[in-house]
Amino acid sequence: MAKILIIEDDLTFSQLLEGFLKKHGHEPYIVHDVKSTFKIIAQHNFELFLIDYRLPDGTGLDVLAHLREQGLNYPVVIMTSFNDVRTAVKSIQLGAIDYITKPVNPDELLMIIRGSLEKKEEHNQTDSVEHQDFIKGKSTTADKLYAHIDLVAPTDMSVIIQGESGTGKEYAARTLHTQSKRNTKPFVAIDCGALSKDLAASELFGHAKGAFTGAVNDKKGQFEAAEGGTLFLDEVGNLSYEVQVKLLRALQERIIQPLGSTKKIPVNVRIITATNDDLLTSIQNGEFREDLYHRLNEFKILLPALRERGKDLELFIDHFIKLSNAELDRNVQKLSAPVRELLLQYDWPGNLRELKNVIKRMVLLTPTDTAGIESLPDEMILAIKQTPKPGGSDLKAINESNEKSLILETLIKVKYNKSKAAKLLNIDRKTLYSKMERYEIE
């Protein structure tokens, strides 16, 4: 079974988790803070991380950032109280594969562990066919989206796919490849957010033996692996400036040069990139090259958030219920009125990915043919109660809610660097600390 690292400061809960995982054949290790995590990561390899969001000397996001800097692509599941669930959803943007809320339901935990390990296997198979998780919507928004895909897919134009986390950017990229003239050649996907600065150039362009410490053999880069086909760069905005320069040269000259080699290799690939940030903002902040942006942006596809897709939401709910019934051997045929109302009212910050997870959990916890409100996460019910209604007259509450969300998103984006966050928000540090205290942001 799996070697799992539990990072949890609650001693009783971590021991319960340890016993539960051992009982189901896994090999758990326990640490209680971020500092100890960094030490054990240097000594052991793990197949899965279960990370408490709030830790004595930091948060689960600090661990995610460290894994990314080290180029370690382990599956990570964030464990969080329902008060932090929106931040946990955002952690998926930094590389977490899933999250689970406390108190942890044992069946749900086993389901998430199994799913996370399976996703790791899928990720290791470069040409694995994308999940049947997504279906075409029938809304006007969906019609416009697929009209754009149909239009640009047969060309060789470079495409940027922009959308929030969980909107299905890789699915859109695979669809573009499938409908292109390159569909008999490889589709290679790279998560640039999971690559360290040092490993990114090697991963993209390859390296020669001895190019750096640990380079014991020649290695082909993903440009060569995708020869004749499509190279998909997810979260391209995370590439370092140095790698951006090399990427621009590869696109301009259609030639790559592996690290530590004098050999120049011609390449013929189509580039599709994805980002959940507006790269124009990154350009203004000096984080992304404008000339590279124009090379990548021959055509832009905007993926709508789930809350903007109207009646498609009901279509997706029914689709995920069918998939979950088949996978979990359940027979959920109906939703109670409160469940349907809540699913349609919730704003789905994690989009299709979050919807799929919530529906799967709901089906797992429903032994009958009708799903009740107890099968939905507490945080969803709380979020509906706390969210000011847009049509309401409490303008102050609406503005405060929006301000809190913007501050949280900015802090996550800059890995909780207060100086950078204050600069991006165009306020001074003192004001930022004051607002964080007011909104109870730690």
Image: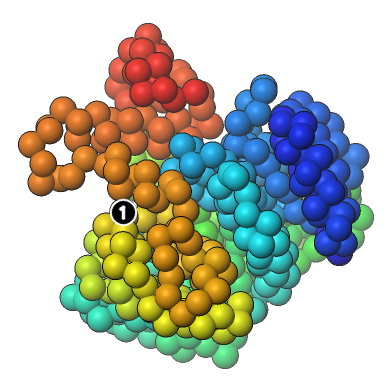
Left or right, residue 142 beside residue 164: left
Position of residue 39 measured from the top left corner of the image (x, y, whole percent): 84, 32
Q: Is residue 414 above or below residue 279?
A: above
Q: Is residue 38 above or below residue 365?
A: above
Give whichever of 42, 325 is nearer the camera: 325
Left or right, residue 396 beside residue 235: left
Amino acid type, callout 1: Asp
Q: Residue at x 46, y 58 (%)?
A: 374
Give whichever of 148, 124 is nearer the camera: 124
Give whichever of 266, 342 is nearer the camera: 342
For the question of whether residue 254 can be seen, the reply is no
Q: Residue at x 75, y 53 (%)?
A: 48
Task: Give the quadrant of residue 13.
Answer: top right
Position of residue 408 measured from the top left corner of the image (x, y, whole percent): 41, 33
For the question of whether residue 179 can be seen, the reply is yes
Q: Find the residue positioned furthest to the top.
A: 430
Identify the residue position indicated by label 1 in the image. 347
Position of residue 435 measured from the top left corner of the image (x, y, whole percent): 34, 18
Left or right, residue 92 beside residue 35: left
Q: Residue at x 18, y 75 (%)?
A: 140
Q: Residue at x 37, y 9 (%)?
A: 430
Report helix, strand or loop for mark 1.
Answer: loop
Left or right, residue 326 beside residue 22: left
Where is the N terminus found, in terms of image quarters? Answer: bottom right
